[in-house]
Image (spheres, helix red, strand yellow):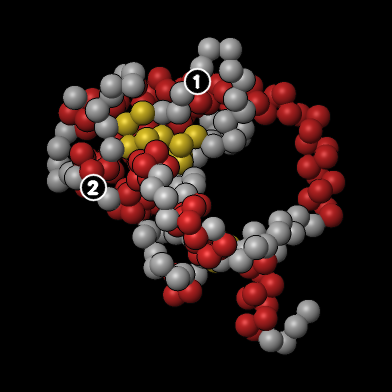
Amino acid sequence: MTRDAELKRTLDRLRNHGIEREPARLQHGAEGPWSYEVQDAGWNYRLPDLLCALGTSQLRKLRGFVDRRRALAARYRARLATTFGRGPGAPVLAPPDDAAGDLGAYHLFPVAIDFATLGVTRAGVMIGLADRGIGSQVHYIPLDRHPLHARRCQRDAATPRPGAARYYARTLSLPLYPALTDEEVDDVVDALAATLQELRHGHPAASLAG
C-alpha cells in the first residue's frame, strides 16, 4: 500500500517482469498497439493465492486442454490454407510449423504475415480485427529492442539478429484457447481475410492465395 502514485507505478512494473506498456513512458516509442518494453529486472508476482489454487486444480484437465488446443490449431491450418494458400511457399501468410510426432500445446498461435508484400501495416491489421471483435497480439518483441537488455548487454544488443528481426516483423498471434469453438476459428479467419481485403483497397480476398 502506498500514497505515492509514482512508486505504485514502479511496483506494478516490477511485479510484471519490469514491463512498461504506457506509450508515453516507452523509451523507444510505440510501434503499434502491441508495444511494450522491459525496462527493469522485475519478477512475476501477478498470481494471487486463489488463482494458484485454481491453477493446481486445472492440471487435472491438462490433457483435455492440450487436445482441444491441437484440434483448434489444425482447424486454423485448414482454414488458413483454403483462404491464403498452402505450404511454406504460401505468398502472404503461414501458420506455425507442426512437425510430425511433435506434441506442442499451442499456448499461442502466431502466424507469419508478409505485411510488406501486402502493402499493409501490422497495426492496421490489429485495429481492423479489433473493429470486428477479434483480439490479436504480438509474441514476442526481440530482446535487443528492450531497454534492460540494451543497458546490461550492450555488445550483444548491438549484434544484428536477422532471424529475430524477420520473425518479429511478420508475426501476429491469433486467438486460441480451449473454450474457442470451431465456428469462432472460422470467424477469425474470415475477419482476417476481410481486414486485409479492406486495407488493400478492395482487392478480392481470393487473390491473397496467389
The mark nearer the N terminus, 1 or 2, is 1
Residue ranking furthest to the front: 155
Q: Indicate whether 69 appears above or below 57.
A: above
The crowd level at tag 1 (other Cα within 10 Å; few <14, some 14-19, many 20+) is some
The answer to whether one can see residue 134 in this image is no
Q: Residue 66: where, in percent of width, then height?
A: 65, 26
Q: Residue at x 28, y 38 (%)?
A: 114
Q: Amino acid at mark 1?
A: Asp
Residue ranking furthest to the top: 100
* Foreground of the two, 64 or 11: 11
Q: Amino acid at mark 2?
A: Val
Q: Residue at x 41, y 28 (%)?
A: 95
Snapshot quadrant of residue 63: top right
Q: Residue 4: where, in percent of width, then height?
A: 69, 86
Q: Nearer the viewer, mark 1 or mark 2?
A: 1
Q: Is residue 101 left or right of residue 169?
A: right
- Quarter of the image containing the N terminus? bottom right
The crowd level at tag 2 (other Cα within 10 Å; few <14, some 14-19, many 20+) is some
Circle on res. 98: 1
Q: Give the CA separation, mark 1 to mark 2.
A: 27 Å
Snapshot quadrant of residue 54: top right
* Foreground of the two, 181 or 169: 169
Q: Is residue 21 left or right of residue 104?
A: left
Question: Which residue, given by chain and number where applicable, does mark 2 sit on?
Answer: 120
The answer to whether one can see residue 58 in this image is yes
